[in-house]
Amino acid sequence: MEALVNRVANSKLVTIDLESFYPSGEIVPFDLKQFLFMELILKEKDFRETLKVHDWTQYDGKNVAVFCSADAIIPMWAYMLVATYATPHASDVALCTPDQYTELAFFRKLNSLDMSDYAGERIVVKGCSDKPVPASAYLEITRKLQPVAQSIMFGEPCSTVPVYKKSVAQDKTEV
């Protein structure tokens, strides 16, 4: 009787688990609405004074998502001023809602990848995760890998869905 061979373990597939790109640390909102006069108008003197006395230590080690939920015109310097107070305390500060922060964090990590590490490789982008991976992350990793990878698949190494395969002419895609 022949020994069983684990073809998946012996394959030269490279697995990318996008869940590992999930931002670490708590994401907390910083809504400028609370700092506006009548939740509509930013008064510079009042705004500066309120920021000065605000308890910034509550953001220590956290990811701060700065946004304004009110339909108000916020001058660009106001965001800059918030950043100057939040940055010494927070792990990260970004202009977005908390939901958008997750997507932004994925894009930052994806953009930091060295695509040459995946040149000529057969890639499996893992499909199952415990944390919510934004659909945009799957699109972005595919867009970044396509010029360098031999093939891109979705799923688990034992059960994949083909997404892209470099043709012999290297100018066509197969789906």
Image: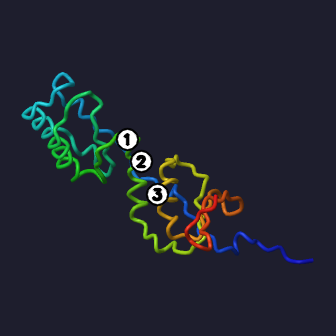
Q: Which residue is mark 2?
A: 102
Residue 98: which numbered mark, if any? 1
Horizontal arrangement in the rendering, residue 140 relative to residue 153 (left or right):
left
Marks 2,1: beta carbons within 8 A: yes
Which residue ends up furthest to the left in the rendered image?
A: 45
Quarter of the image with the N terminus in it: bottom right
Residue 76 locus on image (x, y percent): 17, 42
Seen at 59% across and 63% down, the residue is 173
Residue 15 locus on image (x, y percent): 59, 65
Seen at 46% across and 53% down, the residue is 22
Q: Which amino acid type corresponds to the residue marked 3 in the rendered image? A: Phe
Horizontal arrangement in the rendering, residue 77 relative to residue 151 (left or right):
left
Q: Which amino acid type corresponds to the residue marked 2 in the rendered image? A: Thr
Asked if 36 appears above or below 97 in the picture, the reply is above
Label 1 Cα crowd, 10 Å radius (few <14 / some 14-19 / many 20+): many
Marks 3,2: beta carbons within 8 A: no
Seen at 57% across and 49% down, the residue is 130
Q: Which residue is mark 3?
A: 21
Spatial distance from mark 2 to mark 1, Cα to Cα?
A: 7 Å
Which residue ends up furthest to the bottom in the rendered image?
A: 2
The answer to which of 41 and 175 lies nearer the viewer is: 175
